[in-house]
Amino acid sequence: MSSVLRGTALRVETLADRRELARLVADDPIVNVTVAARLRRTASLAADGLGGEVLGVRDDCGRVRAAAVHAGNLVPIGGAPDAWAALGTALAARPRRCTSIVGRVEAVAAIWGQLADDWGPARTISDRQPLLLLGRDARLPSGDPRVRPVGLADLDAYLDASAAMFTDELGISPHLVSSPAEYRRRVTGLVRQRRALGIVEADGTILFKADLGVLSAHTCQVVGVWVRPDRRGSGIGTAAVASVLRHALTLAPTASLYVNDFNLAARRMYARIGMRQVAELSTVLF
């Protein structure tokens, strides 16, 4: 018999439901790093613990076989086409609180197919984003010793570099997606946690930046990689990213990141470093 959507199934806060969600996350730990990190921080499925509502699709035996966490991002977990469509139908009846949908290509396509009329239009859809992985057994090239955690003294320059990266990548200023105060708060948090890495030049400008965005027991996901435009193509990025990945591998057994499929220069650089593709993601950005 087919599975059914039981309302706001995983919004209940039982230990059994948390175990079911954790099982789904653990089945695909690199793709599900964001939710894995949240589960690591909280024992609850309450919205204030995971950052948003959790919906689930159960089979007729009551086992959760697909879920979606609807927080700042909408993240689908596990499932198959009929379950993703059911999740999309349930979400369409709710107001959108997320700024993006991120997940495996097939899951995002199915969910977005149900949501587009109610939540659309999307500002940008990145259909194909290879998810890349590197393990501790990799032989990284020489790094750049100038890469270091930036400090609060570098915050304004790092904010400028972060906003430039965001605009380059997504075609819109981050200040139009969230308020300047909220964006500054998020970047400041990364700096305070020593998860904002960069090369700071003598005049205080940022030559290179990258963030350690999400950390789980399985992987450290690197995000926001950027080289100042006038220095691209000079080899700075390869050495600097190698340093970032080496640092990330001191925090987790693997380092991961995802990149747009059309960014051939970046993909070639990551291949030279030794990263391999383990999945393909899509992102719908509002």
Image (spheres, helix red, strand yellow):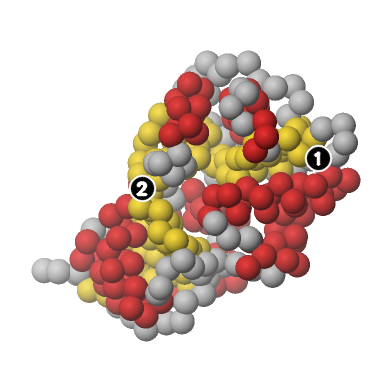
Query: Which residue: 60% across, 67% down?
Result: 177
Q: Nearer the viewer, residue 62 or 190?
A: 190
Residue at which label 2 appears: 128
Q: Nearer the viewer, residue 62 or 171?
A: 171
| Residue type, numbered disc 2 | Arg
| Residue type, numbered disc 1 | Thr
Q: Nearer the viewer, residue 207 or 59?
A: 207
* Residue 112: image location, x then y, percent: 33, 67
Horizontally, is 94 left or right of 192 in the view? left
Q: CA distance from mark 1 to mark 2?
A: 33 Å
Which circle's residue, 1 or 2, is located before the other in the chain? 2
Instruction: Determine whether label 1 and label 2 are within 8 Å by CB.
Output: no
Query: Which residue: 82% across, 32% down?
Result: 201
Vertical placement of 23 versus 258: above or below?
below
Query: Which one is closest to the eye, mark 1 or mark 2?
Result: 1
* Residue 104: image location, x then y, percent: 35, 51
Residue at which label 1 appears: 205
SS of the residue under disc 1: loop
Query: Which residue: 73% across, 29% down?
Result: 147
Vertical placement of 127 versus 44: above or below?
above
* Residue 160: image location, x then y, percent: 74, 51
* Residue 113: image location, x then y, percent: 28, 69
Horizontally, is 100 left or right of 27 in the view? right
For residue 116, what is the image quadrant? Answer: bottom left
Judge whether residue 183 can be spotted in this image: yes
